[in-house]
């Protein structure tokens, strides 16, 4: 069919009204005027086909209406409506109407920022909510629960922007699943320590870790399988048993502590879904004592009496923070994380009983050369100053030899091997890592092992147990607050691979490489 336009027909009729819309902002609200414009075009068209010719008259009318409105959160909406009607002499009529709406978000809109945070952050974060919101144009929406529960929620798709965990393991799970933003990374945020709480009047006269074993004492803890505070508590008990209750230990105190972990469990009457609930058990009189964090005592100082756990058996809780990959507000999420990590944010958290990063002991690193080689051949040599500049992690662990000897139990500080690998590329399923010491001893770690899984794990007594959370393969440079001994002095450093975690489980000693000098990613399992 051929389309031709006839000439000498009715003239073009056009009517136009120009519109000026003026919007002014007054006292946080917007005042707007609206008007409309209409134009009409009439033409004659002739359609010529093989067997017939049809002449039609087409009239097009376009009407646009512009409206500007706003509320106190400043939302501007523009709506346009266009209608076209075509009528032919064949009496056929077709009408088409389209409506388009566009919402423009002003720069001062309040952005909802969802923050999933360990229950122990509750009082602290709630106290800054109004001030931070006012100064940053965000609405902080908190979800407080145990770190394990929050990790599960995020992994199952619950929308979240920021995750504050009371340990590293739960952020590591999300990292392994590629659910974290900022190149799948998380950061150490703050530290905490375990403490015992009893009622202010202390009716059972509990004064130390030994008196918790007195007849009739009821204890509340966080569930160790899902609550970091519970896992840290078990590690404290294991430390007490191995150091104070082991007659061969230089720190031996009394046979009272010989089976401390088992005996303490007989007094546990409440394993709770988060640490705050465990503390509540003491406040309500349901239990006589509870294990929580130092920070838990700040909000309830008038109602609780704290029993300090000695540092040689206590555990440093390493809190971590991350932005979630699915966030629609990464800029605001990173800004909130940046505030918490800033000197101002760290000072604020300190007031609530947390230990700032700057307050942690800094372990000096002896002279060293560490060669990193990626799967594609990228190579990098790190020196002591380079290692010191990297974000460190802290965890508890120890080893068990093939002969059954337990040793090197304590707190390690170092750099996760995954952090080092990421400096020369990435590691994927199907790849693996060789770690070599200066004496030539090499251990081959599978991908699962690099991500903290696939290890034999043991209790403090050497009994096989299952790890409830992934371990961290750490390239350590510090042990119990001091540098690892150098090979020249018969030590194990300056670098050594160790396996640590909040449970402080033991692992096979042959997987701990001394005097590490090389880490290489392989393109094979």
Image (tube, rainbow, N blue to C red):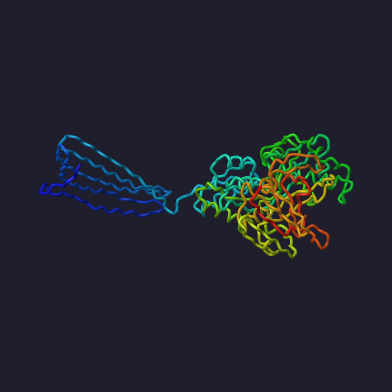
**Is 285 on the left-hand or right-hand side of 27?**
right
- Residue 131 seen anywhere in this rendered image of the structure: no
Q: Measured from the top left, where is residue 138 in percent x and y?
A: 51, 50
Tell which of 80 and 220 is nearer to you. 80
Horizontal side of 523 relative to 220 (left or right) equals: left
Q: Residue at x 81, y 58 (%)?
A: 491
Residue at left offset 64%, top offset 55%:
421
Residue 40 at x, y percent in the picture? 19, 46
| Residue 448 image-quadrant placement | top right
| Residue 4 against residue 135 in the figure, above or below | above
Q: How many marks?
A: 0
Quarter the N terminus occupies = top left
Q: Is residue 436 above or below residue 429?
A: below
Q: Position of residue 300 (x, y in %)?
A: 68, 45
- Location of residue 208 by image quarter: top right
Camera-nearest residue between 453 and 265: 453
- Seen at 48% across and 49% down, the residue is 111
Res 372 → quadrant: bottom right
Tell me residue 401's x, y (percent): 82, 47
**Residue 290 visible in the shown view:** yes
Q: Residue at x 62, y 58 (%)?
A: 377
Horizontal arrangement in the rendering, residue 444 relative to residue 209 (left or right): left
Work out whether residue 105 or residue 424 is closer to the camera in this orientation and state it.
Answer: 424
In the image: residue 68, left or right of residue 11: right
Residue ranking furthest to the left: 8
């Amino acid at each position: 069919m051929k389309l031709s336009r006839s000439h000498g027909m009715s003239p073009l009729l056009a009517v136009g009204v120009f519109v000026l819309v003026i919007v002014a902002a007054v006292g946080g609200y917007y005042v707007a005027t609206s008007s409309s414009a209409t134009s009409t075009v009439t033409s004659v068209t002739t359609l010529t086909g093989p067997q017939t010719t049809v002449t039609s008259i087409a009239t097009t009318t376009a009407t646009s209406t512009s409206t500007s409105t706003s509320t106190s959160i400043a939302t501007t909406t523009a709506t346009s409506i266009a209608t076209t009607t075509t009528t032919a002499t064949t009496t056929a009529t077709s009408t088409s109407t389209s409506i388009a709406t566009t919402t423009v978000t002003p720069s001062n809109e309040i952005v909802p920022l969802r923050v999933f945070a360990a229950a122990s952050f509750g009082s602290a974060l709630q106290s800054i909510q109004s001030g931070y919101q006012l100064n940053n144009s965000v609405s902080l929406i908190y979800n407080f629960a145990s770190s394990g529960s929050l990790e599960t929620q995020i992994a199952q798709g619950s929308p979240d922007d920021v995750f504050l965990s009371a340990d590293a393991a739960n952020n590591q799970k999300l990292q392994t699943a590629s659910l974290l933003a900022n190149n799948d990374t998380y950061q150490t945020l703050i530290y905490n320590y375990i403490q015992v709480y009893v009622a202010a009047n202390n009716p059972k006269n509990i004064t130390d870790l030994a008196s918790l074993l007195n007849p009739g004492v009821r204890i509340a803890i966080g569930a160790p399988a899902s609550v970091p505070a519970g896992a840290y508590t078990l590690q404290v008990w294991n430390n007490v048993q191995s150091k104070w209750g082991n007659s061969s230990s230089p720190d031996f105190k009394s046979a009272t502590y010989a089976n401390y972990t088992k005996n303490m469990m007989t007094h546990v009457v409440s394993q709770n879904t988060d640490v705050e609930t465990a503390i509540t058990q003491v406040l309500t009189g349901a239990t006589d004592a509870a294990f929580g964090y130092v920070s838990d005592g700040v909000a309830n100082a008038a109602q609780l009496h704290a029993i300090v756990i000695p540092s040689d058996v206590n555990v440093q809780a390493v809190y971590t923070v991350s932005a979630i990959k699915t966030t629609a507000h990464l800029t605001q999420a990173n800004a909130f994380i940046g505030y918490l990590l800033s000197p101002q944010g760290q000072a604020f958290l300190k007031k609530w009983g947390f230990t700032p990063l700057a307050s942690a002991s800094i372990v000096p690193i002896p002279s060293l050369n560490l060669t990193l080689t990626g799967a594609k051949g990228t190579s990098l040599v790190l020196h002591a100053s380079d290692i010191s500049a990297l974000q460190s992690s802290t965890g508890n662990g120890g080893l068990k030899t093939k002969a059954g000897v337990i040793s090197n139990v304590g707190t390690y500080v170092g750099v996760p091997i995954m952090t080092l690998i990421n400096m020369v590329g990435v590691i994927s399923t199907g790849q693996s890592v060789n770690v070599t010491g200066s004496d030539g001893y090499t251990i081959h770690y599978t991908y699962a092992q690099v991500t903290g899984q696939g290890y034999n794990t043991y209790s403090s007594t050497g009994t096989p147990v299952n790890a409830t959370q992934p371990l961290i393969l750490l390239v350590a440079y510090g042990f119990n607050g001091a540098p690892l001994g150098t090979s020249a002095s018969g030590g194990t450093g300056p670098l050594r691979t160790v396996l640590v975690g909040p449970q402080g489980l033991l692992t096979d000693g042959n997987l701990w490489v001394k005097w590490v000098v090389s880490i290489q990613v392989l393109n094979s399992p």
